[in-house]
């Protein structure tokens, strides 16, 4: 049964809330009684979602559209929140995508924007918002990482796995620093999840051939991610198949795991260039 007391009188900031996993997180936090601040670039989608969530759950939903590839965005978002007299009790760093192709075939500017969105923006939001959480003795931070942050690196989408591994270690450190103040951080590590991710990244053709048992819907992924952070679990891999892959990545000798990835990764990574 849903416990709406957890979120009553509290507010969650969710990045990348206009689609996929972020949108599902907005539903999950609203279901638990949290008011919401939703951000992404597509304001029309955020506004439509805000109306839907207010009607469905009776929570207050605020929308601030911004582009996290702009280094000024996290500061702008937090200033706007302060200006509205709001506080953030839960942060979901979720916005993300991947840059297809091998490293040298991409433009450095694209990689720089990628690092800004997937790594720097999330760290800056946590850095700006965690002191308030510590002061108020309550905070929950979910960093949406990936199974790619646990498995060996792949050819193609070069910085993707590295950025997710970064967010996993970052979550562990944040949790150790925050737990005595009742501020918990958790890295959620989904595998293949139905969303717009693979369309945006241009690999829908490749991944649509993968068997169904490798896929999850966004709703169960986020329900598990929500539960994990509330329970103070620093890393959570949702789903039986994903847990099995994470287990293999941990127990297989490094070169064996890397060879498996070398053989299989063409099925889900663009490696031309
Ligand atoms: N789907 C999977 O299989 C999978 C697996 C493991 C991990 N993940 C991770 O899950 C997270 C969410 O991805 P998803 O699968 O839900 O993909 P999605 O459906 O494509 O949603 C991505 C979200 O990120 C936002 N976003 C992208 N670039 C942004 C930018 N520059 N500034 C602000 N917002 C931006 C998008 O909003 P706008 O376009 O409106 O800005 C959208 O709301 C990502 O971190 C991804 O790496 C996904």
Image (spheres, grey):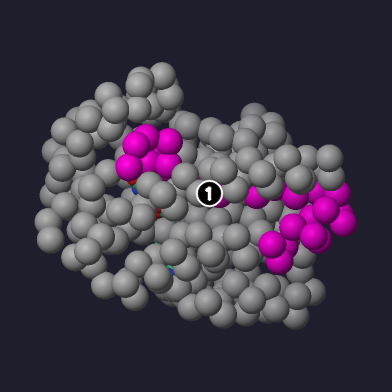
> In the image, is 2 to the left or to the right of 235?
right
Total residue callouts: 1
Q: Residues within 10 Å of mark 1 (few under 14, many from 20)?
A: many
Q: Is residue 248 above or below residue 108?
A: above
Residue 200 in percent (x, y) is at: 27, 61
| Residue drawn at point x = 32 percent, y = 42 percent | 153
Ligand 1's image quarter is bottom left
Q: Is any atom of residue 273 visible in this view? A: yes
Residue 185 in percent (x, y) is at: 66, 44
Asked if residue 223 is among those painted magenta in the image, a careful observer would answer no
Q: Is residue 28 above or below residue 101?
A: above
Nearest the eye: 244 or 257: 257
| Residue drawn at point x = 30 percent, y = 53 percent | 158
Q: What residue does disc 1 label? A: 167
Asked if residue 135 is among those painted magenta in the image, a careful observer would answer yes
Q: Is residue 33 above or below residue 76?
A: above
Magenta segment? 127-153
Residue 181 in percent (x, y) is at: 84, 45
Q: Quadrant of residue 234 in the image?
A: top right
């Amino acid at each position: 049964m849903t416990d709406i007391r957890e979120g009553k009188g509290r507010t969650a900031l969710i990045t990348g809330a206009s689609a996929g996993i972020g949108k599902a997180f907005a539903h999950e936090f609203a279901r638990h009684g949290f008011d919401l601040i939703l951000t992404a670039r597509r304001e029309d989608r955020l506004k439509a979602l805000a109306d839907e969530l207010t009607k469905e759950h009776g929570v207050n939903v605020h929308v601030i559209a911004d582009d996290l590839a702009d280094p000024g965005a996290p500061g702008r978002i937090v200033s706007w929140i302060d200006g509205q007299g709001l506080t953030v009790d839960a942060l979901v760093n979720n916005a993300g995508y991947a840059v297809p192709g091998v490293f040298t075939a991409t433009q450095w500017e694209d990689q720089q924007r990628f690092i800004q969105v997937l790594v720097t923006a999330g760290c800056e939001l946590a850095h700006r918002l965690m002191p308030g959480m510590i002061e108020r003795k309550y905070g929950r931070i979910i960093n949406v990482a990936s199974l790619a942050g646990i498995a060996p690196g792949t050819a193609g989408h070069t910085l993707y796995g590295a950025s997710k591994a970064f967010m996993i270690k970052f979550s562990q450190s944040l949790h150790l620093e925050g737990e005595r103040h009742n501020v918990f951080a958790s890295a959620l590590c989904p595998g293949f999840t139905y969303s717009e991710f693979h369309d945006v990244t241009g690999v829908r053709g490749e991944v649509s051939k993968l068997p169904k048992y490798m896929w999850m819907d966004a709703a169960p992924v986020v329900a598990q991610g929500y539960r994990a952070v509330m329970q103070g679990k620093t890393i959570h891999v949702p789903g039986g198949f994903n847990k099995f892959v994470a287990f293999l990545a941990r127990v297989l000798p490094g070169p064996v795991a890397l060879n498996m990835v070398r053989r299989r990764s063409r099925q889900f990574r663009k490696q031309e260039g």
